[in-house]
Amino acid sequence: MLVVMHLNASQQNIDAVAKAIESMGLQAHPLPGSTRTAIGITGNITAVDPNRLASMEGVLELVRVTRPYKLAGREMHPDNTVVKTPQTTVGGGNFTLIAGPCSVESEGLTVEIAEFLKSEGVHLLRAGAFKPRTSPYSFQGMGREGLEILKKVRAKTGIGIVTELMDTEEAEAVEDAADIIQIGTRNMQNYALLRRVGKMKKPVLLKRGMSATLEEWLMAAEYILAGGNRQVMLCERGVRTFNDHSRNTLDLSVVPPLQATSHLPVLIDPSHGTGKRAYVPPMALASLAAGADGLLLEIHPNPDKAASDGLQTIDFATFTKLRKTLGQLSPVLGKKLS
């Protein structure tokens, strides 16, 4: 259920309706819009009796919400969400680049990459301190030491940090080091983790599970939104299919229906989506054409020597060429390269 308030409804009216909703054992979610405020209702198992709310002062109408993802869907939140960090903005017509190594390898290398990205006008660095790997014998990341390196790099260069949180025990440490907290594909349906980041004040980048449907993905986002964190972004990183010509199948066809259904920004990770560096630039350009709000790219000064995922990592020269092409195409496609 969605309670739509009058244009001239006062804050006192809005608070009174929210209090009435909560007195019914439900959760109220005020959703300020460009012209009026609406209040979403969650927590109901059966239909909500509209009689008590419909007569309250300031209430214009009550709208039944049919989709299971209430807060992630456009029925409750028709306006696009714009996520802001201290360094940049995601959404709102921007095409935001996030780039960096798959994992933190050393302070010197991470500073080198961060300074290169800053010279290219990129404001967000992706790098994993904790790395979920298919094999227990593969490099698992530097852990807490990696987080300390990321904090030093941010302090030295001013670049924003995007890094993955893998379990609730590391939540405080990751939140302290990151400007955007990433939830990886293997944890998309880790509900304890989703509830934990729902309590955080930092934006969350939620990657699609490798076998997740659009609805399952949005229901995972719903856990975060229901926890109170409205700064959620979605990331398509490829799904598992029968193909054998790339690591995953990058599902760019999900972007238009996702944007029609949800107000959350959507980014694309062509590095994980293809698994092969030669395919990353063309799929990055295709992501822009599909209407995405940005990219996650893996870059390294020497990809063949990267500690992890070198096969899908592009070098500095390739990134520079790609960024220039994106800069030329983005205005034509109604985006501003950020």
Image (spheres, helix red, strand yellow):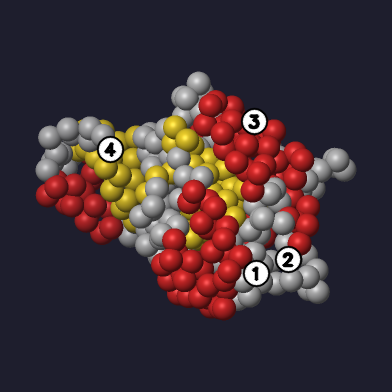
Crowding around mark 4 (Cα neighbors within 10 Å: few <14, some 14 to 19, many 20+) is few
Alpha-carbon span between mark 2 and mark 1: 7 Å
Q: Nearer the viewer, residue 216 or 147?
A: 147
- Of badges 4 and 1, nearer the viewer stands 1
Which residue is most to the right?
244
State the SS at label 1: loop
Which residue position holds label 3?
286
Around disc 3, counting alpha carbons within 10 Å, would you say few (fewer than 14), some (14 to 19), or many (20 or more)? some
Q: Look at 57% across and 43% down and name the residue there.
A: 295
Is residue 190 among the parts visible in the rendering? no
Q: Residue at x 66, y 44 (%)?
A: 317
Q: Which comes sooner in the sequence, label 2 or label 4? A: 4
Q: Is residue 149 left or right of residue 307?
A: left
* Mark toward the start of the polypeptide (3 vs 1): 1
Q: What's the mark number on residue 105?
A: 1
Identity, as a three-letter code, of the amino acid under mark 3: Ala
Q: Amino acid at mark 2?
A: Ala
Label 2 neighbourhood size at 10 Å, few (<14), some (14-19), many (20+)?
A: some
Give the residue at x 43% y 71%.
176
Q: Which mark is residue 307?
A: 2
